[in-house]
């Protein structure tokens, strides 16, 4: 539901606070939630969350801190993001950034990793460990290709990582307006045009590899027509054994869509075998099954699946689920 609301231009500006008994805080905040509270929740905690929602809804100008040592790039980012409701503050070093955050409340930070007196990692660590600063959403805007280890390190602090490139200005605008909870219809016309162009493609799926384990050729055809135009590559397996073989051949698989009723090896068995392999311990698996009974859902979860969708498949819901789990890779 959160992903759906934040993907719709008419509702993405609404501040949302999640209250849950399970720990999906990182995913929720990455998708644009303003806060996360665990159940059981005390009355005071909920009252504080509601006051925060009210404050954000009534807030006028949002403040974005741009931390970039290149003056020309700072100027282009300023031109890209500025509007009547967004004020930009610029810093060229870690020291300047800390001074700006001490001077006023910052709603979002856009920063490079390469800074004159140290790395962006140092700034992130200093902000996160300082009691003097509330931790605003941080968008890392870098021109350097990051290793998987570097990305995982950054994910501890940053809501989003954007690699500078041909599509990056539109992506940066999209991410900043998401975390600022900006009303899209109130943005300048050029910014609205850029956001519409961004949504015509799907960067979450772009360049990803999804393994579809499905026996019914009609379902394979239907899912291919939906997923491949979004930019993902689809690997096909006709049973659980072929799914395991595909995972052994391809290291780059980002998500598995697993049918339950398949010949030779069913989905339950295949998921159990996948979870026995340490390298696939965190690989997202979504179960596809015609059995809509609660017992089938529970059996899927016990076998190691991360999520579950019943047949006949609601394609919009499946795409939303894929977005949620691909964002964690």
Image: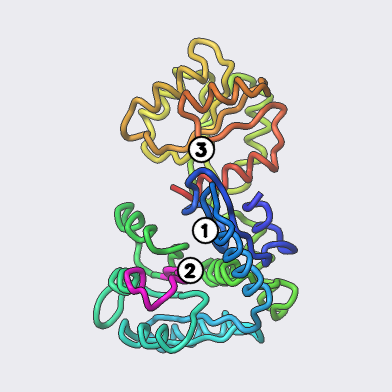
For marks 1 and 3, the one nearer the N-term is 1
Calculate the distance from the C-alpha at mark 2 to the C-alpha at mark 3.
29 Å
Of 112 and 246, the residue lying toward us: 112
Q: Which quadrant would residue 314 be assigned to in this image?
A: top right
**Residue 4, percent from left and from top:** 67, 52
Q: In this view, does 40 lie above or below 266?
A: below
Q: Is residue 22 above or below residue 107?
A: above
The answer to whether the residues at label 1 and label 3 have Cβ atoms under 8 Å apart is: no
For marks 2 and 3, the one nearer the N-term is 2
Q: How would you rate the neighbour count of disc 2 (Cα within 10 Å): few for under 14, some for 14-19, many for 20 or more?
A: many
Q: Could you say which disc has been placed on residue 29 in the image?
A: 1
Give the residue pinned by disc 2. Answer: 137
Nearest-to-viewer mark from 2 and 3: 2
Which residue is at a point 62% across and 56% down the rendered structure image? Answer: 201
Q: Give the range drawn in magenta.
A: 127-141
Give the residue pinned by disc 3. Answer: 210
């Amino acid at each position: 539901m959160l992903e759906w609301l934040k993907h719709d231009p008419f509702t993405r500006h609404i501040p949302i606070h999640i209250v849950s008994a399970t720990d999906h805080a990182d995913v929720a905040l990455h998708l644009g939630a303003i806060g996360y509270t665990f159940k059981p929740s005390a009355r005071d905690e909920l009252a504080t969350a509601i006051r925060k929602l009210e404050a954000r809804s009534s807030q006028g100008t949002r403040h974005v801190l741009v931390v970039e040592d290149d003056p020309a790039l700072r100027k282009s980012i300023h031109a890209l993001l500025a509007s009547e409701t967004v004020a930009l503050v610029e810093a060229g070093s870690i020291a300047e950034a800390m001074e700006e955050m001490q001077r006023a409340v910052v709603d979002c930070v856009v920063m490079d990793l390469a800074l004159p007196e140290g790395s962006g990692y140092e700034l992130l660590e200093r902000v996160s460990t300082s009691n003097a600063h509330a931790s605003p959403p941080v968008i890392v805007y870098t021109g350097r290709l990051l290793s998987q280890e570097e990305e995982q390190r950054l994910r501890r602090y940053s809501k989003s990582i954007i690699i500078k490139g041909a599509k990056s200005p539109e992506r940066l605008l999209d991410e900043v307006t998401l975390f600022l909870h900006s009303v899209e219809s109130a943005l300048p016309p050029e910014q609205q045009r850029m956001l519409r162009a961004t949504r015509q493609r799907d960067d979450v799926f772009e360049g990803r590899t999804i393994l579809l384990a499905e026996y019914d050729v009609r379902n394979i055809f239907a899912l291919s027509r939906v997923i491949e135009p979004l930019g993902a590559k689809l690997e096909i397996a006709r049973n659980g054994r072929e799914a395991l073989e595909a995972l052994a051949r391809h290291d780059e698989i980002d998500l598995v869509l697993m049918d339950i009723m398949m010949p030779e090896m069913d989905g339950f068995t295949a998921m159990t075998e996948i979870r026995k392999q340490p390298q696939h311990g965190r690989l997202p698996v979504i179960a596809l099954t015609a059995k809509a009974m609660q017992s089938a859902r529970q059996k899927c979860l016990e076998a190691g699946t991360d999520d579950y969708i019943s047949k006949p498949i609601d394609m919009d819901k499946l795409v939303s689920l894929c977005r949620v789990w691909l964002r964690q890779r």
